[in-house]
Amino acid sequence: MRGLWIAVWAGLAGMAAADPYCKPSATELAALPGLLAGDWQGEIVQGVAVQGGRPSLLPSGGVPLPATLTVAGQSIRFADAATPAPVFLTTASGAVDFALPGESPLGVEELLGPLLQEAGCAAGDLPQFEGAAAMAAGMAVRFRAYLLAADQMLMVMQVGQFGPMAKPSGTGVRVVLRYGRQAE
């Protein structure tokens, strides 16, 4: 009987310590902006630029990219040196096409699969946030953040022309960034 009690207690303790970054409940999801506030630092994991329909790989690593996340109601306010104004990332779900001009549709699992394995969770089960920012010359940047843990986040940034009126320009940039908390 004592062994059964220990097994039940261990099982309940494991459930109480569930990872809020894999299939979060509505309460956990609503609390995430506050938990993520602070200074972060990113590095390029993967990057592709397409110009005139010709793709080229962007260098990975290099200069660290500082960013700050703050709470903005139920969303996250993302600011870094590359964005002309802060971007508000709101809760998102579902499939997103990350393809650049001239590429076939590229799904999230194909793009982030190896990076998501370390989270031990399918992409659709991770908390996701999305946002957009206008750029010069009719271009825009779309952001999609995937939260792996309290101190790890993957962000995919796409630069291009988007929306129903966008004409394929043969130009775009897709960068996958891994962000971690800045050391204090």
Image: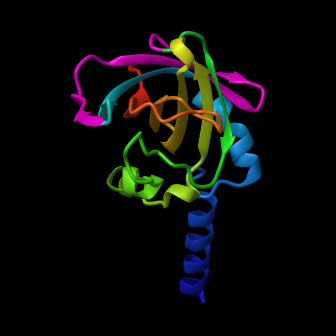
> Is residue 77 a member of the stretch shown in magenta?
yes
Q: Residue at x 45, y 36 (%)?
A: 156
> Is residue 166 shown left or right of residue 75?
left
- Provide residue 142's location: percent of width, then percent of height: 55, 31
Q: How many marks?
A: 0
Q: Residue at x 54, y 38 (%)?
A: 144
**Quadrant of the drawing holding the N terminus:** bottom right
> Is residue 120 shown left or right of residue 60?
right
The colour scheme of the drawn protein is rainbow
Q: Residue at x 55, y 71 (%)?
A: 10
- Provide residue 130's location: percent of width, then percent of height: 61, 36
**Quadrant of the drawing holding the C terminus:** top left
> Is residue 78 shown left or right of residue 120?
right
User: Relative to the observer, which residue lies in front, 14 or 161?
Assistant: 161
Whether residue 96 is visible to the viewer of this picture, yes or no, is: yes
Residue 62, placed above or below residue 111: above
User: Relative to the observer, which residue lies in front, 109 or 42?
Assistant: 109
Whether residue 46 is visible to the viewer of this picture, yes or no, is: no
Magenta segment range? 54-82
- Provide residue 11's location: percent of width, then percent of height: 58, 73
Query: Which secondary structure type mostly characterizes the magenta part of the structure?
Result: strand
Q: Residue at x 45, y 10 (%)?
A: 81
> Is residue 112 a member of the stretch shown in magenta?
no
Q: Which image quarter: residue 134?
A: top right
Q: Which image quarter: residue 163?
A: top right
User: Relative to the observer, which residue lies in front, 123 or 101?
Assistant: 101
